[in-house]
Amino acid sequence: MQKIIILDFGSQTTQLIGRRVRELDTFCEILPYNKYPEDDSDVIGVILSGSPLSVYADDAFHVDLSKIRGRLPILGICYGAQYMSHIYGGKVESAGTREYGRQNLQFVDTECPLFYGFDQHSQVWMSHGDSITRIPEGAHVVASTETVQNAAYYIPGEMPIFGTQFHPEVFHSLQGTLLLKNFVVGVCGSKQEWSADAFVESTVKELREQIGKDRVILGLSGGVDSSVVAVLLNKAIGEQLTCIFVDHGMLRKNEFQDVMRDYECLGLHVIGVDASEKFLGDLAGVKEPEKKRKIIGRDFVEVFNAEAKKITDAKWLAQGTIYPDRIESLNITGKVIKSHHNVGGLPEEMHLQLCEPLKWLFKDEVRRVGRSMGMPEHLITRHPFPGPGLAVRILGDITREKVRVLQDADDIYIRGLREYKVRLSGEEARAVLAAGVPADMQNGEIEGSLYDQIWQAGAILLSEVRSVGVMGDERTYENPVALRAVTSSDAMTADWAHLPYDFMAKVSNEIINKVKGVNRVCYDISSKPPATIEWE
């Protein structure tokens, strides 16, 4: 299969480049900058990512492009453009002040293959502290802004080279998708054969060949990834699949029953295990966040293993590992920086082989695959939810009563986000459509819910804090609840969602009036970094 190689120099938006290429129905692979494959017979083009480093610094990342130049088209983005300028006779210097944010192009050479169809004053997004003060030998300037003369350059040839100081992968670069399409399809010649339907067809065939008549065990969480894996495997091997769904007592309100009902409607064979007594008992009196996580992780493995061992003829363990999980498990030097989050403590004596059918997909693609197989929309668009559940959204020790309070408050909040309809246009509309949420565009706008605009949302119970309130002329001394909602593309960075005041007023009033034990509602306006999405 044709593919684009993206060499990662450490940019926060490298995954976003990959997602944009996949949206062009073209397969791509993200590799550390120094791990270019020996066999590149199926590669049709190379993209060099950005980086937090300077190309002239002692610790700059260097890559030998001699094997690539002249054989394949190359697109350098930010650091990638600066690096090629640096090694091919140009010059890169400190810009004096960091150039960050929206800029409008003042000049665009629309005869350049990279800029076919571009508007002369298209908005782009800059994010760099260095500037290309002299372009590489043989290059032409093909785009400029008011402050950046060499915003993009072009070295013509049978296998051309392009460099852009701006980031076409971010939504703020309004014609960034067009630029990437010009490169991937126009210059590199992608046949655009990578699609959700094609993935389902080929993966079902591969799974049948891989698994044969063996039995497979899958741990379900109710989330998007594991649910899509379950349906995909069910489509491939049917009754050979057994799913296990463990209720640790800290799921959202009615979630265990709702998810079990959904899985039944999907025709899945699911063993539901209510292990809430064990989890809550082991967590009694524990306040330290990391200790809570470790207890939940340990207990989950024990419960899952106990159920899995009953299936004596199982040969495979299936997991909802997706591409970002694998990318984030290695840094750009190839060293492990965190343990794989899906593999935790399964004893070696189980002798199960690993099956990860989604390992090449981004989250948006997982959702498209789910839709391709006809899964219910509420399962596909479900926000990410932490494995330890509400345990990391209750500050302090865990009790059934605290879980009940938080479940009630969270239910009001999430239900409200789903019910509140908004008209979206511009960047917000593009973000929703790019995420694969079905919507009809009319007059440049779409109707959607607040829930669809948000990457992740939830309520947090500040159970270690009491605040004074007044209800019915009586003094109360109860817990505050904090609401959290963030926008993001990959959860590596996130900004707090600017929710409408009337929505927040309504939700706050409903929580205080209906949830016994809460007399105050706050809203978290912290971004990641420096904060994290979850509180614990």
Image (tube, rainbow, N blue to C red):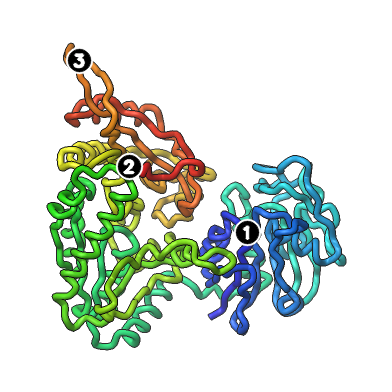
Q: Position of residue 500 (x, y in %)?
A: 41, 31
Q: Position of residue 444 (x, y in %)?
A: 51, 45
Q: Which residue is under mark 2? A: 458
Sequence-wise first label, 2 or 1: 1
The amino acid sitting under disc 2 is Gly
Q: CA distance from mark 3 to mark 1?
A: 60 Å
Q: Position of residue 15 (x, y in %)?
A: 53, 60
Q: CA distance from mark 2 to mark 1?
A: 35 Å
Find numbered disc 3 in the image and state the secondary structure of the residue it sits on: strand
Sequence-wise first label, 3 or 1: 1
**Residue 115 visible in the displayed image:** no
Q: Is residue 50 left or right of residue 136?
A: left
Judge the density around disc 2: few (<14), some (14-19), many (≥20) Cα neighbours within 10 Å: many
Q: Is residue 337 left or right of residue 45?
A: left
Q: Is residue 145 left or right of residue 236?
A: right
Name the quadrant containing residue 183: bottom right
- Residue 228: assigned label: none
The amino acid sitting under disc 1 is Leu
Q: Which residue is under mark 3? A: 475
